[in-house]
Image: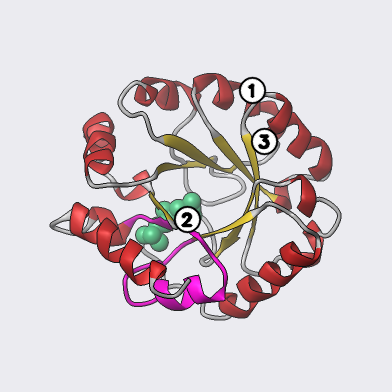
Amino acid sequence: MIKIAPSILAADFSCLGQEITRMEKAGADYIHVDVMDGRFVPNITIGPPVVAALRSKSQLLFDVHLMIVEPEKYIPDFVKAGADIISVQAETCPHLHRTIYQIKELGAMACVALNPSTPLHTLEYVLSDLDMVLVMTVNPGFGGQTFISAMLPKIAKLKDMITTASSQAVIQVDGGIHSGNIGEIAAAGATVFVAGSAIFNSKNPEQAVAGLRRAATEQV
Ligand SMILES: O=C(CO)[C@@H](O)[C@H](O)COP(=O)(O)O
Ligand SMILES: [Fe+2]
């Protein structure tokens, strides 16, 4: 039930293929791919050709987090490249319902990400259409930031909204997750955990993944 998704933003970009294989061997469930455009966030990372090149390196689900403006222009390319889950930031989607259905019609799982300051009611009328909701627990753009603890009540409130809406959506969290805080985040209702620094900066990624999973599972 608990899913651990290493973010390759913290990987060695000179050998991303090997880094992904290393994460699969370490017991990861998903590979989290952060796509940044230098416009929605002040950082630039990778695009569909890199995702396509990495696709053959792992059987794991590719969880592609789009931190880009006008994501609807690029979603088909990312799905073609091998994305299994596409997350769009709600702040970039004036036609959010349409974008969610664009993702689903292309055969990928649809997720909407919310910045820390974006209210949950943005999702009120689309919650039952979603496979996952991503609560950003840092302001997007960089790895290695500190978890914003005000997101704990937000996660708990989202969990209630999902139950009330009889939605199948699971709650993902991303930013500043480590073995010391994952328990309380799981207790609030999250089940999918993105972790970059906590896994890639560890000397033993297998132990890091197992430790995160154990600490989260104990609280569910
Ligand atoms: O989307 C983002 C940042 O914008 C994340 O996926 C980070 O890459 C997570 O890194 P850590 O906070 O775990 O180091
Ligand atoms: Fe991310």
Image x and y of residue 70, in percent: 70, 36
For disc 3, the marked residue is 71
For disc 1, the marked residue is 76
**In contact (CB < 8 Å): disc 1 and disc 3:** no
What is the C-alpha distance between the residues marked 1 and 3? 10 Å
Ligand 1, image quadrant it occupies: bottom left
Please tell me whether mark 1 sits on a helix, a strand or a loop. Answer: helix
> As displayed, is residue 59 above or below residue 96?
above
Applied colour scheme: secondary structure
Please tell me whether mark 2 sits on a helix, a strand or a loop. Answer: loop
Image x and y of residue 168, in percent: 69, 52
- Residue 34 part of the magenta-drawn span: no
Amino acid identity at mark 3? Pro
What is the C-alpha distance between the residues marked 3 and 2? 29 Å
Which dot, 1 or 3, sits closer to the camera?
1
Query: What mark, if any, has residue 1 been given in the picture?
Result: 2
Residue located 27% across and 29% down the image: 17
What is the C-alpha distance between the residues marked 2 and 1? 29 Å
Query: What mark, if any, has residue 47 been given in the picture?
Result: none
**In contact (CB < 8 Å): disc 3 and disc 2:** no
Residue located 61% across and 48% down the image: 40
